């Protein structure tokens, strides 16, 4: 007869654990069912984050420009030093060749001990003339040695200077690569955020920017037409070379912003200002920070003239042209074009009159 074994009842502790686990599972299921799905960031929130990323990218871009400018200067210095070293080596080789010729002449002229030559000579006067020539030869040889030693020291200094510049150049190139990757990272992150918006939302943002740009352009045009005595509107124009630079910048309205670009078809902020002044035959530094220290500082917005440079942000990483009537003409950021904009859209620091 088959035996029937009674199932063992779970202990009190085990029942408590199972009950607690089941309760927790039910609670989590209930929470999951009732929890609202994670909300998608609004269009304005995305724009705010993207604008911040663009600002950070522009900071890195100006540092990139500074490193690039330094690299170009170092490359020119290295080329000049290497040319000097090459010419110096040629000069040293010529001096050594001359010294060899002197040594050969001395050997040919004085192979026997001088006292023995005098003893054997049938013409003492002739020997004395030869001995005098040998003394002169030795003096020339000593002078040649001094020249060689001086040239060797100079050459060693030039080689060390070239070596130091090459090391500095390698460091600068590494920094350039880091800044480029930083800019690309910020821009990539901004693009990913923009991609979370619908086509309709992106179009709405662009339309809003276009309206603001047209409004700024109208105000700048009003300032240009205003009489010069209308100082509060900012219609007072700058010098002829300043206005020539400003006109060059105006000719590039609609050109795309590209970080590190300095024309003629695309620009970043300081690339536009430096390119425009170059068209007026005025050379100014490449970066916004360097441009901020280049001319005469204008502290108050009310004292700005059309064509003055305007510097923005505490670290001076953005620059544009004052367009009058509280407007600026500048290359704003990635995704935008050279355009007019209100001076109040960015934290104004001061103006610079070139």
Image: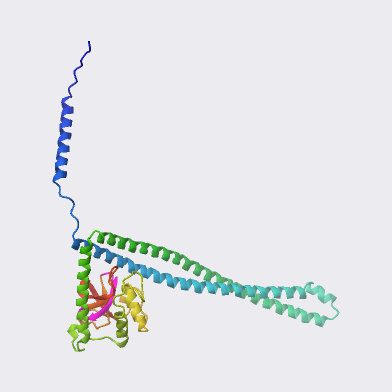
Quadrant where the C terminus is found in the figure: bottom left
Residue at (74, 80) in percent of width and height: 133
Most distant residue in the top direction: 1
Residue at (77, 80) in percent of width and height: 130
Residue at (15, 47) in percent of width and height: 35
**Residue 272 appearing in the image:** yes
**323 within the magenta span:** yes
Asked which quadrant contains residue 279, the reply is bottom left
Quadrant where the N terminus is found in the figure: top left
Q: Nearer the viewer, residue 186 or 212?
A: 212
**Region rendered in magenta:** 314-326
Asked which quadrant contains residue 142, the reply is bottom right
Q: Position of residue 50 (x, y in %)?
A: 25, 63
Q: Position of residue 75 (x, y in %)?
A: 46, 71
**156 within the magenta span:** no
User: Taking 320 as reference, is 44 left or right?
Assistant: left
Residue at (59, 72) in percent of width and height: 89
Total residue callouts: 0
Say if 110 sits above or below 4 in the image: below
């Amino acid at each position: 007869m088959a035996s029937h074994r009674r199932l063992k009842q779970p202990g009190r502790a085990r029942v408590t654990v199972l009950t607690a686990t089941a309760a927790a599972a039910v609670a989590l299921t209930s929470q999951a069912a009732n929890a609202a799905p994670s909300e998608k960031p609004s269009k304005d929130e995305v724009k705010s984050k993207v604008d911040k990323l663009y600002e950070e990218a522009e900071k890195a871009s100006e540092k990139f420009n500074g490193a690039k400018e330094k690299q170009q200067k170092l490359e020119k210095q290295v080329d000049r030093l290497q040319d000097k070293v090459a010419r110096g080596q040629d000069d040293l080789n010529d001096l050594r060749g001359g010294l060899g010729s002197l040594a050969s002449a001395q050997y040919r002229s004085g192979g026997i001990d001088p006292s023995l030559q005098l003893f054997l000579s049938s013409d003492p006067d002739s020997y004395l003339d030869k001995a005098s020539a040998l003394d002169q030869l030795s003096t020339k040889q000593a002078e040649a040695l001094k020249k060689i030693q001086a040239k060797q020291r100079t050459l060693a200094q030039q080689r060390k200077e070239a070596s130091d510049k090459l090391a500095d150049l390698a460091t600068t190139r590494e920094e350039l690569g880091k800044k480029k990757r930083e800019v690309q990272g910020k821009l990539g992150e901004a693009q990913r955020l923009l991609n979370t918006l619908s086509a309709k939302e992106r179009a709405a943002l662009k339309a809003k920017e276009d309206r603001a740009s047209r409004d700024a352009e109208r105000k700048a045009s009003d300032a240009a037409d205003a009489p010069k005595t209308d100082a509060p509107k900012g219609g007072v124009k700058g010098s002829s070379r300043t206005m020539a630079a400003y006109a060059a910048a105006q000719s590039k309205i609609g050109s795309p912003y590209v970080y590190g670009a300095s024309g003629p078809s695309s620009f970043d902020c300081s690339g536009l200002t430096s390119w425009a002044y170059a068209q007026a035959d005025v050379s100014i530094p490449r970066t916004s920070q360097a441009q901020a220290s280049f001319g005469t500082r204008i502290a108050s917005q009310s004292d700005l003239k059309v064509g003055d440079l305007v510097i923005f942000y505490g670290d001076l990483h953005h620059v544009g042209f004052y367009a009058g009537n509280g407007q600026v003409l500048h290359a704003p950021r990635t995704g935008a074009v050279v355009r007019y904009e209100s001076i109040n859209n960015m934290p104004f620091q001061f103006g610079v009159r070139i």
